């Protein structure tokens, strides 16, 4: 998989068009940008409601995004026994995603237009900082340093380190964050194509399953992801979008919350009315 760049025209109104550029991860000598098959990962958080995060961030309902944040790990020993290579596959996949991120950002640094439509303003900022640091070191040294600054300042939206509270301790985890727009195109038709979740039975048959607005924590899910480069006025870098089909390898059993009624002691405060005396019958 190698970074490549394509261009397209965007209508700016009044009959004017502007050239924009898209950087994708494609097969060598091809324009095909396939999804990457990631190994199964444990779910930390997820947002799978109909409108995604639209209400949370006050977006238009069709602009919402559904997301899953996952981490490396195996939830049960019997799963590790059944999938002995899963832990190493997870480690390899995270390293691969980090490399692809850096490859795409470096490609953008060298190939996007220096000025005008489709350029990234952060490249110029990196050059200005590099010139201050390098002084009279020469053009090659300035360019090398600018590239380092540009890569270091990029946003890797698909890999995020988070401090997470687990019981009484705080653990730092690398989360693989994948997102999907609630409104997308399929076969050239724009519409809502929500994720479809599948499970496989003991004989290898796949069947669709219903999920709620989120997946329970530690659910072992396998997704296909596609790295995407972006540039904006305040940041630039890459994100990960995920394909519609998601395979659920394992789900924790639902635990019903049990209400325990405590014994409440009763104390008299002396203000109760005395019980009425029984009438004496003669």
Image: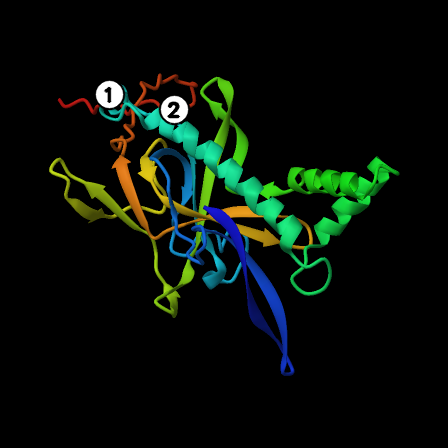
Q: Position of residue 148 (x, y in %)?
A: 69, 38
Q: Which quarter of the picture shows residue 133?
A: top right
The vertical placement of 252 against 198, above or below, is: above
On the picture, is 160 further left or further right than 79?
right
Residue 17, x across and y down, in percent: 62, 76
- The residue singled out by tag 2 in the image is 272
The residue lying at 52 percent from left, 54 percent from top is 4
- Check the picture and name the quadrant holding the C terminus: top left
Foreground pick, 280 / 157: 157
Q: Please name the residue shown 20% across and 25% down the image.
A: 279
- Residue underneath mark 1: 81
Left-right relation of 245 to 155: left
Residue plotted at (68% across, 65% down): 117
Q: Which residue, as the protein is rendered here, is positioned at the far left?
A: 203
Mark 2 vs mark 1: in front? 1
Classify residue 35 as left or right of residue 238: left
Q: Residue 166 location in percent, x, y?
A: 45, 22
Distance from Cα at disc 2 to Cα at disc 1: 66 Å
Residues at discs 2 and 1 in contact (Cβ within 8 Å):
no
């Amino acid at each position: 998989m190698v970074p490549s760049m394509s261009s397209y025209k965007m209508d700016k109104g009044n009959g004017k068009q502007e050239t924009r550029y898209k950087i994708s991860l494609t097969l060598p000598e091809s324009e095909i940008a396939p999804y990457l098959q990631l190994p199964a990962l444990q779910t930390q958080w997820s947002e799978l409601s109909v409108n995604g995060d639209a209400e949370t961030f006050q977006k238009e309902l069709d602009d919402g995004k559904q997301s899953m944040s996952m981490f490396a790990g195996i939830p049960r020993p019997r799963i590790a026994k059944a999938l002995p290579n899963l832990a190493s596959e997870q480690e390899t996949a995270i390293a691969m995603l980090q490399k692809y991120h850096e490859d795409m950002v470096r490609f953008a640094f060298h190939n996007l237009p220096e000025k005008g439509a489709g350029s990234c303003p952060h490249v110029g900022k990196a050059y200005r900082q590099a010139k201050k640091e390098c002084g009279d070191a020469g053009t090659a040294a300035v360019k090398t340093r600018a590239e380092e600054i540009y890569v270091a300042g990029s946003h890797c939206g698909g890999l995020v380190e988070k401090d997470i509270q687990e019981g009484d301790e705080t653990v730092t985890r690398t989360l693989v964050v994948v997102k999907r727009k609630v409104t997308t195109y399929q076969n050239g038709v724009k519409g809502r194509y929500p994720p479809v979740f599948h499970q496989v039975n003991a004989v290898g048959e796949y069947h669709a399953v219903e999920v709620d607005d989120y997946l329970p924590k530690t659910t072992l899910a396998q997704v296909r992801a596609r790295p995407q480069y972006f540039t904006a006025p305040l940041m630039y870098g890459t994100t990960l979008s995920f394909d519609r089909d998601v395979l659920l390898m394992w789900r924790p059993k639902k635990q019903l919350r049990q209400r325990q009624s405590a014994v409440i002691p009763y104390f008299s405060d002396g203000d109760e009315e005395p019980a009425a005396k029984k009438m004496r019958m003669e």
